[in-house]
Amino acid sequence: MGINTRALAAIVAGAALAASGAGYAADPKGKEKCYGVAKAGENGCAAANGSHSCGGLSKVNFSGQEWKLVAAGTCEKLGGKLEPFEGPSPLDLSQKKK
């Protein structure tokens, strides 16, 4: 039993699509990507800076490079941004000066 060339090509293309995060290019209806609101391990997919390629792999809370899906129109109300950003989110209280 061998894998035919088309099946192998489909598997490789699917894996590349998943790794790139392109599977989330069109957000589900009524949702938007919100950067800076995901807790460690609760991100939606690949990091914007390429540090990892899968959901659930973020290592820090509220990174501006990590996103999760939220209800459309609520991201900024939650303290996040619609585009990736550098540095900690305003939600990251551990970065606040005392």
Image: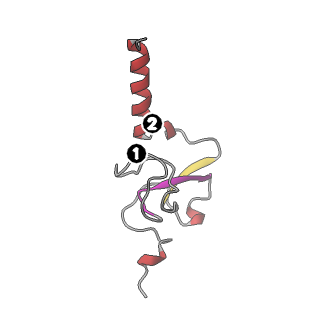
Instruction: Label 1, secondary structure: give it.
Output: loop
Percent position of residue 16, x then y = 39, 32
Identity, as a three-letter code, of the amino acid under mark 1: Ser
Q: Is residue 95 left or right of residue 72?
A: left
Which mark sits nearer the N-terminus, 2 or 1? 2
Percent position of residue 62, x then y = 47, 65
Query: Extreme bottom residue here?
Result: 98
Name the residue at 53% across, 38% down: 26
Q: Is residue 4 left or right of residue 78?
A: left
**Which colouring convention does the figure follow?**
secondary structure
Q: Is residue 69 magenta?
A: yes
Q: Is residue 88 above or below residue 26?
A: below
Count every numbered label the image shows and give the total: 2
Q: State if disc 1 and disc 2 touch (CB < 8 Å).
A: yes
Q: Locate residue 60: give its quadrant.
A: bottom left
Q: Nearer the viewer, residue 40 or 50?
A: 40
Percent position of residue 50, x then y = 34, 49
- Residue of label 1: 53
Percent position of residue 73, x then y = 62, 55
Cα distance, mark 2 to mark 1?
A: 8 Å
- Return the mark for residue 66: none
Magenta residues (range): 63-71
Counting other residues with Cα less than 10 Å from the Cα at mark 2, is it few (<14), some (14-19), or many (20 or more)?
Answer: some
- Residue of label 2: 18
In what quadrant of the picture does the N terminus appear?
Answer: top left
Name the residue at 45% across, 56% down: 66
Identity, as a three-letter code, of the amino acid under mark 2: Ala
Name the residue at 43% across, 33% down: 17
Q: Nearer the viewer, residue 11 or 68?
A: 11
Name the residue at 60% across, 65% down: 77
Instruction: Label 2, secondary structure: give it.
Output: helix
Q: Nearer the viewer, residue 39 or 92?
A: 39
